[in-house]
Structure formats: C-alpha cells, structure tokens
Image (cartoon, rainbow, N blue to C red):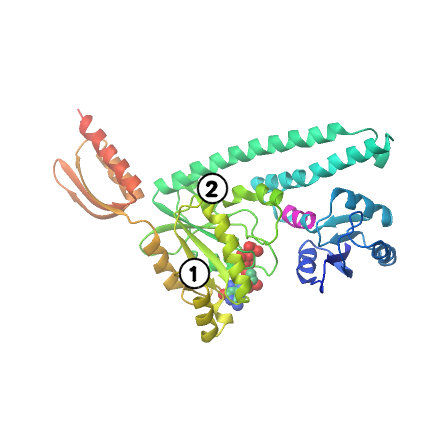
Amino acid sequence: MKAIIVKRVDSGTPDTEEIRDLARAAGYEVVAEFTQSRKEDPALQVGEGKAAEIGRAVAESGAEVVVFDNELGPYQTYNLGQQFPEDTKVIDRFRLILEIFGQRAQTRKAQLQVELAELRYELPRAEAKTSLAKRDERPGFMGLGEYDESREQDIKDQISNIKDELDSIARTEADRRDRRRESGFDLVAMAGYTNAGKSTLMQSLAADIELGENEELHPDLDTTAEAQDRLFTTLGTTTRKMDMERRDVLLTDTVGFISDLPHWLVESFKSTLDAVYYADLVLLVVDVSEPIEEIREKLVTSHDTLYERNEAPIVTVLNKIDAVDEEELREKTEALSALAPNPIAVSGREQINLEGLRDRIDAELPDWERERLVLPMTDNTMSVVSWVHDHARVNDVTYTADEVILDFEARPSIVERSRAKAGELTSAPSA
Ligand SMILES: Nc1nc2c(ncn2[C@@H]2O[C@H](COP(=O)(O)OP(=O)(O)OP(=O)(O)O)[C@@H](O)[C@H]2O)c(=O)[nH]1
C-alpha cells in the first residue's frame, strides 16, 4: 500500500526519519512526504494550501493512506478526509503504531490490548461525529444513517468486556508465576526501549537445552524470539530458560518502550509490564551506542515507568558495547552514573561479557536458604524426597533404617513447604 507522510512542526526543520520507519514497519511504501513549519491549524493541522497540495499528490501517486506524524484531533481527521480524494485513509502517528501492534499481536492478550487501544482511540472520535451530526441537524450526515449515540455506548461496552477478559488473563499469569517460583525458578525480566537489543540478548543468554518435562510448567515458553531490525519485534512477552550454572532462571522479554506515547495507548498495554513488575530482578537494557542525551532521556522515562510499581532490584545493562570505543564507553558510563549507578556493559550480539552479566544476575537475585530436614520413614517419605529433588538443589541425602536426612538449598518459599511436608509425615506415621 502506498502512503504519503506529513509532518508539521511549530518551528525549525521537521525530521521525518522515525515516522518513515514506522510507516515501513507497518508495511507501507512511502511515495512522498510533506513537511511544514507553522503553528497548528485547528481545522486541518497543516495550512489550507498545504492540505490541497497533499490532496493533489494523493491523486497523482495513487496513495491510499496519508500518515500524519502529528496527533490529529477527531475534527481534523474528518476535515482532512474531505480535502483528499474519496476513500483516502487519514491516520496519525498513534493510529499507525496501533496498526503495527495489530499486525504483531500473536497472543490473545496482545490482541485484546490492541483492540482496547483502538477502542480508546475511537471513542472521542465517535463522540465528535455524534456532535457534528447533531450540530448539522442532518440525520445521515457522514453516512452514519442516524444520530449514532449507540455507537459510543457500544464502544464503552466493548471496552469494559475486554478489560474483564484481560483481568482474567492477568490472574492466570499470576498463578503461573507462582507455580514457576514454587518450582524453584527465579524470574528475571528484561525491560527497555524498542531496538535496545533485548531479543538478541535473550537469544544469547538462553539455554539451548530442552526445557523440563513438566509440561504444565512451561505452557508458553517460546523458542522463536528472533531479533529483527524492525520496530517492536516483541509484542507481548517471551519466556525462555536461561543458561545458568547455579540457579534455574526464567528470562522474560517484554514489549519495548516507545517515546511520546499518549496516555490512552500506554494504559492499554500496561499489563504487558506485569512480568517486569513481579519479577525477582529487572534488567533494564539500553543501547549505549546512542547519543548520551537520548540514553539519559530513555533511562529517566524507563525509571518513571518502573518505579510506579516495581519492587525488584534493577540492573542497567549497557548493550551494544561493540559499537563504541573504550573511551566513549567510559565517558558515557560516568555521565550516566546517577541514573545507572552500577551498570554492566555487554554486547548481546557479539557475546561480549555475558559471563559477567550472568554473575551479576546470580549475585542480585535473592539468596537461597540452606536447610537440613530429617524425615521419618513412612509410606510417603520417598514422595517428599522426590518433591524436594524437583524443587531444590539437593547437596546430600543420607538413608538410615528409619530416617532420611536431606541437606538442600532452595528459595525461602520452597524451604517452608518442605518443612510442612515433613511435618505431615510425622503427624501421620505409617501403619
Ligand atoms: N552493534 C550491535 N547491535 C546489536 C546488538 N544487539 C542487538 N543489535 C541490533 O539491534 C537491533 C535491535 O535488536 P533487537 O534484539 O530486535 O531489539 P529489541 O530491544 O528486542 O527490540 P524490540 O523487539 O523492538 O523491543 C538489531 O538490528 C540487532 O541486530 C549488539 O550487541 N551490538
């Protein structure tokens, strides 16, 4: 599909690189672009002459879509549509981002989130249509057929249904996190801006070995997290087992942050960050090859987002060190010291310092407790022994005629459950 790009700025020279990338990511072929430096026109966003010029270009090039980098108000969208050849689609930056999200949404959750965002985008526009129709006192205005207040109610109902379904998915996910923790896994989540290199890092850190036989434990493990030089390759989360010596760690990649997102869009994708909020450790990945001001800005925004609910420790990962020289890395690390106090520098793609990162993860995760349990020999003793084997690191087992002594290390919650199981054996000795 052919698209024409438009960007208006109040002053200075407009930069269209990002909106071009977004348009391409959505699958459009950009056939022309128009920029303008002037204050916003309330009716058309750009000036009247510019709008007419774009209209002619649409007709000549056969473009089907006009993409504005600026946010378009409901009335502007309508008015622009009147200026362009019939059936020309007029969308803004946010509608475009939604299209990309829609194409990438693979899970039910991601699809619902996209739908929710679309409905939230549409609601004020439906309200605007209704009020335009009323003002004109012309039933049938804009092909609505009648004053369409029911459309607004319909959108509100759909929003509420989707929220209910997302809540129930969130509960399922919380249960799954609990099960994984009970099975002895530490949960590490990656956060960061889109294109920081999270998917690539995930691939480098993930274990190649097959995942455990316990199907129930890994219903959504995905081994196809591919890195692509496209925006938002990761919509929704991907979880893989990490290759670690001392611990069982599950690493979850989350959707990348994006700059300048409006509130309604962020709201819709908020639960994507649950994996981050409820992790035992967060890796905040930044692309250290970017200009320092950009890195700083992204770190500030990331922290704002994370501190809202996050309780886990955060490790800042300065990624892509292969793309900067030593001097630049030193300068940037120093300049960022207030925002990223104890960063670790790596390259996910070139596999530089991944051992250092693994050690850091190991050191930052909560310590396991050491426990020595004496189990009386009953009919059920061996099932407790095997449960502990499944959920903890067993250092030593001693069998005597009437006892089994287990020496192991585990997460505090597992130690507690082992003690409870041992207690049940004592209170119900075998016949
Ligand atoms: N130079 C360099 N480039 C890298 C490195 N890691 C990733 N890249 C490149 O950075 C781009 C983005 O990588 P991804 O892993 O897809 O980034 P992401 O953070 O998962 O992106 P989203 O899925 O959009 O959130 C790709 O072109 C990678 O090849 C690295 O260590 N060094």
Q: Which residue lies furthest to the top in this view?
A: 431
Q: Is residue 212 visible?
A: yes
Q: In the drawing, does residue 74 fall left or right of residue 209?
A: right
Quadrant of the image containing the N terminus: bottom right
Q: Which of 230 and 298 is in front in this view?
A: 298
Residue at image location 54% in from the left, 64% down from the top? 293
Quadrant of the image containing the C terminus: top left
Residue 412 occupies which quadrant of the picture? Answer: top left
Measured as percent of width and height from the top left, residue 93 is found at 69, 51
Q: Nearer the viewer, residue 311 or 369?
A: 311
Measured as percent of width and height from the top left, residue 255 is found at 54, 50
Measured as percent of width and height from the top left, residue 153 is found at 69, 28
The residue where tag 1 is placed is 338
Residue at image location 24% in from the left, 39% down from the top? 385
Q: Main secondary structure of the magenta part?
A: helix
Magenta stretch bounds: 95-102
Task: Assess whether residue 96 is covered by the magenta stretch.
Answer: yes
Ligand number 1: quarter of image: bottom right
Residue at image location 47% in from the left, 34% down from the top? 171
Residue 150 occupies which quadrant of the picture? Answer: top right
Q: What element carries label 2?
A: loop
Q: For disc 1, does the CB lie below 8 Å from ligand 1?
A: no
Which of the two discs, 2 and 1, labels the residue nearer the N terminus? 2
Q: In the drawing, does residue 171 fall left or right of residue 53?
A: left
Q: Can residue 199 be seen in this view?
A: no
The residue where tag 2 is placed is 219
